[in-house]
Image (spheres, rainbow, N blue to C red):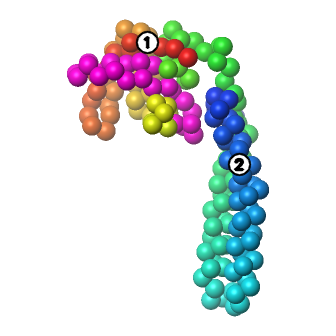
Amino acid sequence: MSFQYYTQEGYDNLKNKLNDLKTRGRREISAAIAEAKDKGDLSENAEYDAAKDAQGHMESEISKLEVLFSSARIIDESTIDTSTVSLMNKVQIKNLKNGAMMTYTLVAEEEADLKQGKISINSPFAKGLLGKSVGDKAQIQAPAGLVEVEVVSISI
């Protein structure tokens, strides 16, 4: 079994989402199904069909999250190496074409949030940075084309 590593915050978010779906989510779906049943003939009841579909989607999401949670491990930030770019590193890079500075934290896929500067370790951009040291250059295939960057700093 391979493990998925999370920050404490990411692990807690995963746990809370799973708990919310198992409690509030199931309760709401159950109420929607009961309400639709009260409306009569189930064979032609679109509300009932929609509620049952929603239940199936939610149970599928719960199963997916349970698998993720079973392999989830909290990464100990005190053990993170900052000599080269790796998971949980905050990396400051400079675009060599236009001089723009960018800072990203490499996180598990489920924690990725570009607005917060968190990119998935599985993204092409993160993969292009993995293993690089301060001063190293990388050519990364981005949606807009090839981007050449230099690693300026690596921290936690």
Task: Return the mark for residue 153.
Answer: 1
The correct choice, above or below, for 121 with respect to 56 in the image is above
Residue found 66% across the figure and 60% down from its top: 58
Q: Quadrant of residue 109?
A: top right
Q: Quadrant of the N terminus?
A: top right
Is residue 3 one of those drawn in magenta?
no
Q: Is 57 positioned to the left or the right of 30 in the image? A: left
Residue 138, visible in the rendered structure: no
Q: Quadrant of the C terminus?
A: top right
Task: Tell me the SS state at disc 2.
Answer: helix
Q: Amino acid at mark 2?
A: Leu
What is the span of residues highlighted in magenta in the rendered image?
91-112
Q: Residues within 10 Å of mark 1 (few under 14, many from 20)?
A: some
Name the residue that disc number 2 marks: 18
Task: Return the mark for residue 132.
Answer: none
Q: Is 53 positioned to the left or the right of 142 in the image? A: right
The residue sitting at the left extreme is 97
The CA distance from mark 2 to mark 1 is 36 Å
